[in-house]
Image: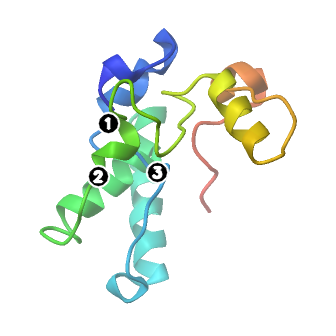
Amino acid sequence: MDPRNAVRPMVRFYSQFNVLTDCVAWRTESITPGQLLSHYQQRVWGAKDANGGLVEHAWDELIKTHFAGRSMPVGELANPTPMQIKKYLRKASALDSEYRRFAEEMGVEGLFDTREWNVIEGHRYLCRPVVV
């Protein structure tokens, strides 16, 4: 994600990743569930800090190794074209009002809190799952 697409200063954090994981697809025969679990467990257990265990880093590593030459990034999802209707809403690059407007078009009402999870959940938030 280009930092210019961040709608709030706090979300510029996501621009440091080579891979964003809002939408990930793969051929199920290309990696076994056990391989995927093992890779992620090793990433989390070997992480030097909380960021090292983030799924974005794990997928980036898989793309560079296991899926080398067999992956396709879709930049339009992370970097919408300015002044165009967004094809995909990401909380880092969309405003609450954009979610509301889209929801209203679909007949859905409600509030859409796009703050970061650590702000919403406070001290209970873990940026990575507990992997056993």
Label 1 vs 3, first from the N-terminus = 1
For this orientation, the residue located farthest to the left is 69
Kindly identify the residue that appears in the image at 38 percent across and 89 percent down.
29
**Contact between labelled residues 2 and 1, with CB atoms less than 8 Å apart:** yes
Q: How crowded is mark 1: few (under 14 residues within 10 Å), some or many (20 or more)?
A: few
Q: Where is residue 61 in the image (x, y as percent from the top left)?
A: 26, 55
Tell me if residue 125 can be seen.
Answer: no
In the displayed structure image, the side of residue 96 where residue 90 appears, left or right: left
Tell me the mark number nearer the camera, choosing from 1 and 3. Answer: 1
Residue 17: image tag: 1
Is the residue 118 above or below the residue 54 in the image?
Answer: above
For this orientation, the residue located farthest to the bottom is 29
In the rendered structure, which amino acid carries the disc numbered 3? Val
**Contact between labelled residues 2 and 3, with CB atoms less than 8 Å apart:** no
Label 1 vs 2, first from the N-terminus = 1
Tell me if residue 77 can be seen.
Answer: yes
Q: Label 2, on which residue? A: 60
Q: Label 3, on which residue? A: 44
- From the viewer's side, name the closer residue of 102 and 96: 102
Tell me the element at label 2.
helix
Tell me the element at label 1.
loop
In the rendered structure, which amino acid carries the disc numbered 2? Asp
- From the viewer's side, name the closer residue of 113 and 86: 86
The quadrant in which residue 13 appears is top left
Q: Where is residue 25 in the image (x, y as percent from the top left)?
A: 42, 68
The N terminus lies in quadrant: top left
For the residues labelled 3 and 2, the Cα–Cα distance comes to: 14 Å
Q: Where is residue 109 in the image (x, y as percent from the top left)?
A: 87, 37
